[in-house]
Image (cartoon, helix red, strand yellow):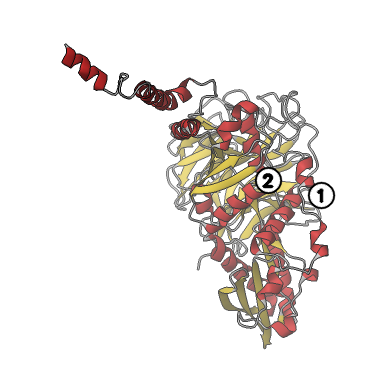
């Protein structure tokens, strides 16, 4: 009996009169570590946060307009109205303050894309543009589809800048695809992008990178902020 | 320390969760910026470049840069990659550059063309193209087609022809012109002639005519001899012949046996076979590019709509469900779309495409007159149609996304019923 009591006292789980209160403190520390590790694995599953989206979001921001009778012939698809922020994002007149610099190929491509965007906006606005009375002036779709509103806005904003050169072969344009992960900050800034699956066509890959660089996203709603900061997968398909 | 561990592990666990995923489709297509440097040598080079510029503009593939913005001096620069200062072309946004040198030998015009990839300072294409002075436009068309193929791997259509109906004092006549509307040649004279359709070899046309009285019937004209032969005379009328892609049979509509149906006949004649038998009117056949199916118009459900069926008349599928008057289907060379004209709620006909698989209808024209009778270019990158947007009915081309509309004909009394011819045989 005396021997058994001695064994217990010598274990690390009890206080040893020879080492005082230090033994029980050590046991408590180990228990806390175990609790922390367990919490790290299990707590995220029970935290009150939005469930990650399992399916691809195919969402479009609905245009402000009149609902259209589905039995009628469709109206011509038209561009969204220009955003005020896209005008504000133009570079300032810094070039005049320094020596003339030869533009890079990327800048030239951006200028060309901007020219193309201007050219497509020469069409007259359609007074009968289809949409919903509760839609957005920047929306491009006539009806809502599956998906979150914020991701619909992300899709529409990027899509507005998704421009590929006409000289890509029809076969490549129909079958090539690519995936880019974008990381979105609290204010909507695209913090970085990583091309996880390039298309293999330099024209298309360059167009995707330019589309992301030109895109200004709205700030995510608070409940999605942490999710989108961890990355949103953008699948570019023909 | 413990808090750090907690967040690190929590983040690690969250990273295993699947990310939100967004699919983005249907990129906008931007025309490729190209510079056509002024031609050096004989002045005929400038005429050729003018035709080439028109071809490139109409194709929608290229955006021509304004020559007034050019920084390089063509007289000093030369036309080889070693002498060209590509930085002066990148500075104006050019992605491609065309250089040319023209000379005249007797009645023959010769132009040496070179195509450059500006960002990579590399020559992509070089060749000498020659033609009699009267056929100078063909030099531009041939080089233009080679440029299109160089970039897209698809054939260009600048050397193709278009058949259409010209309004004249003496009725409606069949005309054949270059794809840009130049060099129109009237093939028929007198009576009313409609709905030209090309044999796949491009040597003859079928058309519908009242030329022999007793209603409309089908005829065929040899384009080299202008000899006209009857093709089908049956029932009250026979109209709208279209040849199968392999050229061994043709489909048409006829009112024989108390109803208007689609019929098929071997090209060499023989047994005619009726392939529709609905109580409604079935007209306007158009073959799929593989020749296995036929698109047509039927009012069997109450209003004219687009349907498809197997070549033997089985497996009928309704393709359009919007609108109450859809007509004139034209199956695209790639097989994915059918272009057609449809009447909207303002009772105006406009052009649309319908995706054969998904049924999605896309509008191509709107608020610009009446737009009808689409016909695809053989590479599927353009559609020719008739439009009243400039006043009298004329032929126009448009891209399949509804952009880049360009006028093709300028007929005094009007033009209609276009049919885009096949690629030239080499």
User: What is the chain identity of the residue bearing mark 2?
Assistant: B
Query: Residue under circle 1?
Result: B390
Measuring 65% from the left and 39% from the top, which residue is drawn there? B352
Residue situated in front as seen by the camera: A57 or A8: A8
Is disc 1 on the same chain as disc 2? Answer: yes
Residue B84, position as x, y percentages in the image: 66, 79
Residue A45, position as x, y percentages in the image: 46, 23
User: What is the chain identity of the residue bearing mark 1?
Assistant: B
Tag 2, which secondary structure? Answer: loop
Res B216 label: none
Residue situated in front as seen by the camera: A37 or B91: A37
Badge 1: residue crowd in 10 Å (few <14, some 14–19, many ≥20): few
Q: Earlier in the sequence, mark 2 or mark 1?
A: 1
- Disc 2/disc 1 C-alpha distance (Å): 17 Å
- Image quadrant where residue B284 sits: top right
Measuring 78% from the left and 36% from the top, which residue is drawn there? A126
Query: Residue under circle 2?
Result: B402
Residue A217, position as x, y percentages in the image: 67, 39
Residue situated in front as seen by the camera: B250 or B121: B121
Asked if the residue at tag 1 contacts the one at tag 2, i.e. Cβ–Cβ closer than 8 Å, the answer is no
Q: Is residue B379 visible?
A: no
Q: Residue furthest bottom?
A: B106
Q: Is residue A125 visible?
A: yes
**A83 versus B37 height, above or below:** above
**A145 versus B228 height, above or below:** above
Residue situated in front as seen by the camera: B222 or B66: B66
Measuring 41% from the left and 23% from the top, which residue is drawn there? A32
């Amino acid at each position: 009996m005396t021997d058994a009591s001695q064994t217990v006292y010598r274990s690390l789980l009890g206080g040893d009169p020879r080492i005082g209160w230090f033994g029980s403190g050590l046991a408590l520390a180990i228990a806390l570590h175990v609790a922390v590790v367990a919490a790290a694995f299990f707590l995220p599953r029970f935290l009150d946060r939005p469930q990650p989206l399992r399916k691809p979001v195919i969402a479009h921001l609905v245009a402000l307009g009149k609902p259209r009778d589905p039995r009628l012939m469709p109206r011509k698809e038209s561009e969204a109205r220009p955003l005020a922020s896209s005008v504000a994002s133009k570079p300032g007149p810094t070039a005049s303050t320094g020596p003339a610099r030869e533009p890079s190929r990327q800048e030239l491509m951006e200028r060309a894309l901007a020219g193309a965007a201007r050219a497509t906006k020469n069409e007259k606005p359609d007074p009968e543009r289809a949409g919903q009375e509760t839609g957005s002036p920047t929306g491009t779709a006539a009806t809502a589809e599956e998906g979150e509103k914020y991701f619909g806005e992300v899709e529409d904003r990027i899509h507005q800048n998704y421009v590929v050169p006409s000289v890509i072969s029809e076969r490549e344009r129909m079958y090539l695809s690519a995936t880019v992960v974008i990381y979105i900050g609290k204010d909507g800034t695209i913090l970085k992008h990583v091309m996880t699956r390039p298309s293999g066509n330099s024209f298309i890959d360059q167009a995707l990178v330019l589309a992301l660089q030109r895109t200004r996203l709205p700030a995510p709603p608070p409940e999605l902020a942490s999710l989108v900061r961890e990355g949103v997968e953008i699948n570019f398909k023909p | 320390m413990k808090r750090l561990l907690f967040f690190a592990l929590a983040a690690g666990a969250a990273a295993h969760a699947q990310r939100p995923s967004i699919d983005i489709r249907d990129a906008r297509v931007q025309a490729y910026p190209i510079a056509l440097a002024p031609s050096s040598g004989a002045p005929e080079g400038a005429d050729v470049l003018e035709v080439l510029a028109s071809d490139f503009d109409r194709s929608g593939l290229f955006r021509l840069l304004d020559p007034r913005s050019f920084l390089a001096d063509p007289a000093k620069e030369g036309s080889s990659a070693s002498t060209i200062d590509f930085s002066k072309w990148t500075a104006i946004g050019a992605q491609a550059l065309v250089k040319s040198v023209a000379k005249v030998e007797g009645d023959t015009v010769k132009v040496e063309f070179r195509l450059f990839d500006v960002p990579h300072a590399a020559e992509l294409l070089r060749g000498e193209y020659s033609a009699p002075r009267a056929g100078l436009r063909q030099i531009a068309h041939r080089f233009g087609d080679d440029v299109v193929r160089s970039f897209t791997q698809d054939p260009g259509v600048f050397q193709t022809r278009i058949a259409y109906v010209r309004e004249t004092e003496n009725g409606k006549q069949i005309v054949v012109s270059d794809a840009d509307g130049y060099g129109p040649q009237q093939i028929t004279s007198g009576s009313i002639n409609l709905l030209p359709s090309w044999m796949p070899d491009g040597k003859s046309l079928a058309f519908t005519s009242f030329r022999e009285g007793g209603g409309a019937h089908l005829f065929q004209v040899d384009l080299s001899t202008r000899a006209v032969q009857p093709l089908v005379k049956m029932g009250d009328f026979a109209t709208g012949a279209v040849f199968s892609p392999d050229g061994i049979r043709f489909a048409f509509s006829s009112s024989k046996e108390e109803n208007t149906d689609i019929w098929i006949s071997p090209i060499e004649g023989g047994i005619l076979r009726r392939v529709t038998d609905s109580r409604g009117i079935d007209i306007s056949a158009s073959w799929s590019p593989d020749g296995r199916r036929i698109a047509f118009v039927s009012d069997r459900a109450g209003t004219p709509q687009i349907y498809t069926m197997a070549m033997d008349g089985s497996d009928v599928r309704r393709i359009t469900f919007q609108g109450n008057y859809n007509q004139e289907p034209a199956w695209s060379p790639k097989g994915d779309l059918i272009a057609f004209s449809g009447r909207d709620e303002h009772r105006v006909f406009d052009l649309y495409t319908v995706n054969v698989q998904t049924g999605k209808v896309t509008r191509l024209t709107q608020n610009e007159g009446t737009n009808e009778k689409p016909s695809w270019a053989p590479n599927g990158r353009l559609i020719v149609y008739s439009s009243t947007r400039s006043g009298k009915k004329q032929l126009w081309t448009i891209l399949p996304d509804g952009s880049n509309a360009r006028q093709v004909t300028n007929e005094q009394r009007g033009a209609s019923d276009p049919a885009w011819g096949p690629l030239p045989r080499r």
